[in-house]
Image (tube, rainbow, N blue to C red):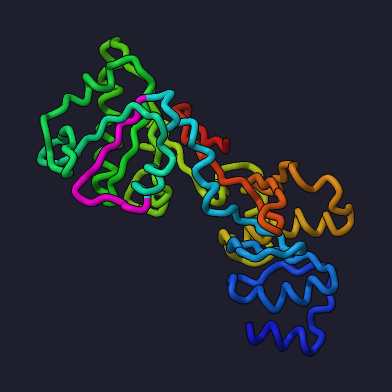
Amino acid sequence: AEHISDMIEYGELDTQLIIGPVYSEEFSPLLAYAEERNIPVVSPLQYVDYASPVLFNMPAPAELKSAPVAGLLDGSREVIKIYASNNDTTFINEVNSIATNSSEVALNFQFNRGSYFYTRNSNGSNGSLVNIEELMRTKSEKVFVVMASSATDVDRILTTLSSTKSSIRGRGLTYGDYTVLGNREWLKMTSIDHDIFFHNDVVFVVPYYANRIDEVVRLFDGRYIASFGALPSRTSYRGYDAAMIFCRMMYEGFDGFLDVIHTPLATPYKFEYRDGAYTNTNWVRQHYRHDSKIVVE
């Protein structure tokens, strides 16, 4: 913040558009300066909770991240929550905050030379043994929500669901279609083979999407490597999005900017005027479909 104040004092911010800074605490002196001169200020990496008519937030606010999956937990499907010995309390709280009127089953998972599921008692202890095949063969549509925090437990649970489905199908039997609502922390677990996500129709809610197997991302990567000799980071992708959206707006004007989907690379943005600033309202629903395609929904 002190460096930004120095830049303002010495006239180093004589510009028509400001992208950045990185940290939210640095925005206060910058926004005061920008408001006096009606200069748009874009926050590319962090949601900045300031009321300012010149502020544009590219990250969506945390309170909107449940919207892409609310339809999975609205009571239209049976919800089966699977716990392990160690669970992600942040993810549990997120799920509990959006699950409404759901028909729920709570299970405990335990691996001991095999995968076992038990009903979960109100105190978290194991109840009776559950035959996961019988549970999956009921015809109701299901959402499995895996609360486990350990990569080993997540992998074992997803593998068990996938292999059970394959066994049922291989014998020509019927089962209820299911989706797994995933924890975006799984995407950071390098020990998990992402193929298991496709086998289980896993859905994630993520703040940003840029899959390097997508053609548009591969083309960007190629140009970036040719210019800088390295693969782009997530910050590089977001910086490109900021430049493509807002530099264009500097020439074309901001008429029609709101309530339109902007997709400069792979992540879609939709801006609204909320709480005194312009804010992207789109969290990304990233769906690993059983046809081996990743779809942004």
239 vs 8, nearest the viewer: 8
For image coordinates 36% across by 48% down, the residue present is: 93
- Number of residue marks: 0
The answer to whether residue 149 is left or right of residue 215 is left
- Residue 199 visible at all: no
Tell me which residue sits at (41%, 34%) in the image: 100
Reply above or below: 230 against 203. below
At 24% from the left and 42% from the top, the residue drawn is 83
The image shows residue 176 at horizontal and vertical percentages of: 35, 18
121 on left or right of 152 = left
Give the residue drawn at x 71%, y 42%: 261
Q: In which quadrant is the N terminus drawn?
A: bottom right
Q: Is residue 72 left or right of residue 235?
A: left
- Residue 95's place in the image compared with 30, above or below, is above
Furthest residue to the top?
172
Nearer-the-camera pick, 109 or 165? 109
Q: Is residue 234 magenta?
A: no
**Residue 217 in picture, x, y percent from top left:** 63, 48
Nearest the camera: 155 or 65?
Answer: 65
Task: Give the residues in magenta.
Answer: 78-90
Dividing the picture into quadrants, the one containing residue 163 is top left
Q: Is residue 80 magenta?
A: yes
Residue 136 visible to an observer of this rendering: yes
Q: In the image, is 153 to the left or to the right of 183?
A: left
User: Considering the image in quadrants, where does the C terminus appear?
Assistant: top right
| Residue 235 x %, y % | 59, 62
Q: Position of residue 116 (x, y in %)?
A: 15, 34
